[in-house]
Each structure stands twice: as structure tokens, then as C-alpha cells.
Image (cartoon, rainbow, N blue to C red):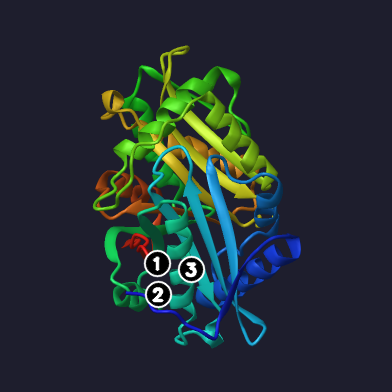
Amino acid sequence: MMTAVTDVEITRVADEPGLRTWFDVGAAAAAHDRPADPPPSWVETRAELTRPWPRRVVEHWVARRDGEAVGALSLAMPTHDNVGSALIDGDVLPAHRRRGIGRALLARAAERARAHNRTRLILEVRRGGEGEALMRDVGARAALHDRRRRLPLPPADPAALARLEAEAVAAAPGYTVVGWDGPTPAEHLDDIARLSGRMSTDAPFDDLHWEPEAYDAARIREIDAALAARGVTALVTAARVGATGPLVAFTVLLHRTEVPWHAGQGDTLVEPAHRGHRLGARVKLANLARLAAAAPGVRAVDTWNADSNPWMVAINEAMGFRPYDAWTEWELDVEPATDP
């Protein structure tokens, strides 16, 4: 049960100065909690004003105490699938923690989710951090455990990567690899939509309530445009059947020019009928080589995997990814509105 905190004013962001205040709170909290992480991007954040993320309603809120901005909250509410959920993220300045501000932000998130007919909040919290105690105090459920791994670049053992790639190529003689940077080529839109949709059915979700997502070419175009507006380049490598057949595996790396030393691993998926040919390793290794050519300044790549996904973890660790930190996806039920 969440109780109100009466000396905190929480207001919705309505313009660019307000969004900048929201951003500055989150950036200060992240710098304190995760100083070795890539910093948050103002370019990405500002793009929400002109090109919101496709098929989501997003709200930003700022908490103030005595006029000072001390907390930040965002709610992302899917509009085409998973319409019963609200994805939330929140930060409180370190000097103002353990004073009820996080609880007040959660109460506001529940209020707004209820207004949008959502039945649950979903939020990710770093294990061992201060947010875990709050999750337990408010009765949230730990639904999915995952771990971030980091790959230092250049690789510590290039010969091992070369051997891994040779083994992957030998295991898949009936496939060829294609790749591109930025927007998806028209000829691959339908295949990438099909593979992206499987990410919401094939990846482990454990106890997390997450429904299948519907993707089509239009949705892929919307995502590509949103990434471009945020200054993010997607590097994609895919495997196809033969030289001209459909794409049956793909992987994505995301790179921001604002942070030239870092890249993030996006989706990786192999269609079930084509598993067992080491296509996951093949496309990931080929994409890593493309990253080195396109962004030679990258010195670290981060990837997240569910603890219940030993297959992808094995590929990543063979490539040299090592555990960096651990996270938990929590669910919190939203109490229905009561009649007066």
C-alpha cells in the first residue's frame, strides 16, 4: 500500500525547459549510481518532444521539495499491445533519498496508470541498489531477473573470436550474411518485422506479464525514424537462407555519436526452425566486426540477458562478455479506482 507524501509537489513536464529539468535529475542520479555507464543523452530525450517513441504514450513528471527539483518519473504506455501495462522509470537525487520521494513518485505513477486503464506497473531496478527495498515495501513482485554483461574492445583474445567465427560459418553452410547501418532496406522490412515480433514470444519472460507484440513494415519504419531522430545508429547483421531467401536470424547494435566509446546490444533472434546452426554466434560476430569498422572508437559493448536464457549467455560469454551488474524487472498491481 502506497501512502501520500504531502510535502512533495509533482508536476507534469509540459515544455522543453521542464524536460531539461527532468533530464538533469536523472543524469545526476545516474552519474552517482553508475559512474562507469554511458551518460544519458539530451539529444535522445529532447526528441520525445518532436517524435515520441512509436505506439507509446509517454509522460514525464518532476518532483520538487521546497521548490528544488529532486525526483524524476517517466511512464511509457503501449497503445497497440500490452495495453494493460505502464513501464515506469524513476530517479531521486542521492541527497534526497529515503525521505519518501520515491514512494510519492510511485503513487503518482499508479494514479496516472489507473487514469489510462492500466492494471500494472513494470519497472527495472538494479540489484543491490536502494530501489530494491522500496519495491518490497510497496508489495511489488520480482518477475524477471537479468544481468548486464560488458565486452571490452578491442577484444582481449582476437584469435579466440576468429576460431568462434570459423566454427559458426562451418556449422551453417546453407546461409549467407547481409548487413546494413541505419534504416532497414525496403527488401528486408517484412522479414525484420516478423523476426522482431518473435522477440516478444521467444525470449524468456519468466513471470513477467508481457503479451506478444505485433510488428509490420510500418512499425519498423517508425522505429527506424525514431532512432534517427535520437541520433542513434542501428547496425544490423542478418542471416538468410541461401543467397536470396528470407532472413531467419538477426542481431542489432546501437551506437550514439554522443558517446563514441560505447555501444549497446539490441535484439538478437534466430527463428526456431533454423536453430542449431550457430547462426546467433555468426550474426553477432559479423556485426561486431562491422561495428569496429563503422565506429572504431567504441571501447565497450553492453548486453542484457535474462538469467533463464543460458543459450544466449553462452554465446556472449564465448565472445568475451563478462558480468557487469544485475537487474530485476518488478511488477506492481495498480489498485482500481474506488467509487466515492
Image height of 65 relative to 105, above or below: below
Residue at the image point whose x is 41% and y is 61% from the top: 123
Report if residue 166 is visible in the image: no
The label shown at residue 108 is 3
Sequence-earlier tag: 2 or 3: 3
Which comes before the other along the chain, label 1 or label 3? 3
Query: x%, y% of residue 5?
Result: 47, 82
Q: Give the CA separation, mark 2 to mark 3.
A: 17 Å
SS at mark 1 in the image: strand
Residue placed most toward the observer, 145 or 273: 145
Sequence-earlier tag: 2 or 1: 1
Question: Quadrant of the rendered structure where residue 25 is?
Answer: bottom right
Amino acid beneath label 3:
Arg
Task: Answer whether labels 2 and 1 touch (C-beta < 8 Å).
Answer: yes
Asked if marks 2 and 3 touch (Cβ < 8 Å), the reply is: no
Q: Secondary structure at mark 2?
A: helix
Name the spot of residue 265 as percent of width and height, x first. Answer: 48, 47
- Label 3: few (<14), some (14–19) or many (≥20) C-alpha neighbours in 10 Å: some
Q: Residues within 10 Å of mark 1 (few under 14, many from 20)?
A: some
The residue identified by callout 1 is: 125
